[in-house]
Amino acid sequence: MVRGLDILAFNALDADSNMMRVTNEMMRDFIRDRMSSDLSAHQVNLYGKLLKSNRSRYVAASSMEERLNDDYQTRYESYRSWTTKLIVRCVDDLLRKYSIKRSSVRAVVANTTVGGMVPNLTSLIGHHLSLHHSVRMIELGYMGCATALLALEVVEQQLGPGEIGLVVTSELTSFMANLKADSDASLIANTVFGDGVGAFLVARRPHSESGMLRIIDHAGSVQTDDKAMSAISYEPNPTYHEIRIHETIPDVATNGIFQVMKPMVRRNLAGLVDKALYAVNGRIPRWQSRVGRVVLHTAGRKVLEGVTQALGLSQYQVSHNFEAFRKYGNTSSASIYYALDEMVKVEPIRRGETLLFLGYGSGFMTRAVLMEGLS
């Protein structure tokens, strides 16, 4: 029996309609006008340097000042309210796009990195869709920016042949921002991360649905050495907890990507001649021409540039990722949906086109998924 997973449709939640857009210029002016008395000269100068580029991101808030004076209860209640509202809208939009009966959904895998909720995301989705009590629900929490790709592998394991599933990703990283943080690593995170929500509608083969992408293969790695473990961390503060990004990330991310690409290339992207040459003299196959375009986690411009160079990718293969980062920032694992959305806006996926998805983040976890266009 043929096994595997097809993506029927996806949705990157419309940020303009659901969240507040914050440009670097807006944030720079806000820090200068409202926060300079609360910050050291070093912090103000660092913010100025970090916010020089022309880019933006979206946050689940109604004003720039909304969270300045939060206590823990206020922050958590707001997080729970925004999360519930946005995941429901994202799922509803996706099901309207594909026009499928809600009762068809037989498994839901949800992931978030920011915080925990009880009832959790999958239960909220099940309640909203009035799903049957036998639907399989799995929650992936605090697993970092690669988790939306891991969720595709997990949901396949929960589905029987022909069954429909949902993968839902909610990453409201703005709730972890501490604008007055003492650590430079936290200030860097404050200027990079934005909020994002996305979802995949999937079906396990064989099925009778109209598909968008066929998953060919998965690969993953986890680095647990000291350097990798300290690249990204969450640190407590009186209100919630804050993200800290350290300068080791580009090196750690590149190492993780090489680890997942080796088996991916060997299994799917190297011909017989390539394999023979590799066995004889260790020559790494030139696999790049066998991939149409690449969807990357938009960790930051420097990371994107490093990955592009390290893997020998062309601008055609990766330019949509840079545009997604310019518009949305680093939306953690939700960035995969926004980068994919930017890609299809430029050029629809061609039937038979090979796409490589790469996610990398805290832990340090890296995931690669190879897909083929069906439409």
Image (spheres, rainbow, N blue to C red):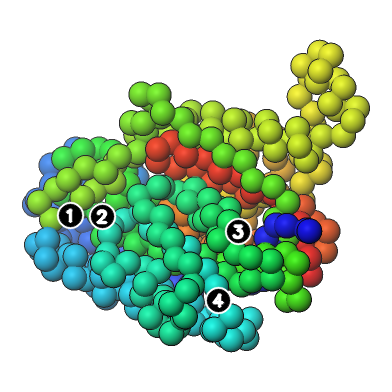
Across and down, in percent, residue 122 comes to: 40, 69
Instruction: Give the Cα separation between the discs numbered 1 and 3.
Output: 34 Å
Q: Nearer the viewer, residue 266 or 106?
A: 106
Q: Secondary structure at mark 3?
A: helix
Instruction: Give the Cα separation between the discs numbered 4 and 3.
Output: 13 Å
Badge 2 amino acid: Met
**Residue assigned mark 1:** 240
**Residue assigned mark 2:** 176
Is 202 left, or right, of 205 in this rendering? left
Badge 3 amino acid: Glu
Across and down, in percent, residue 212 comes to: 72, 68
Q: First in sequence, mark 2 or 1: give its number.
A: 2
Q: First in sequence, mark 4 or 3: give its number.
A: 4
**Labels 1, 4: front one:** 4
Is 284 left, or right, of 163 in this rendering? right
Crowding around mark 1 (Cα neighbors within 10 Å: few <14, some 14 to 19, many 20+) is many
| Residue positioned most to the right | 273
In the rendered image, the quadrant that contains the C terminus is bottom right
Across and down, in percent, residue 176 comes to: 25, 55
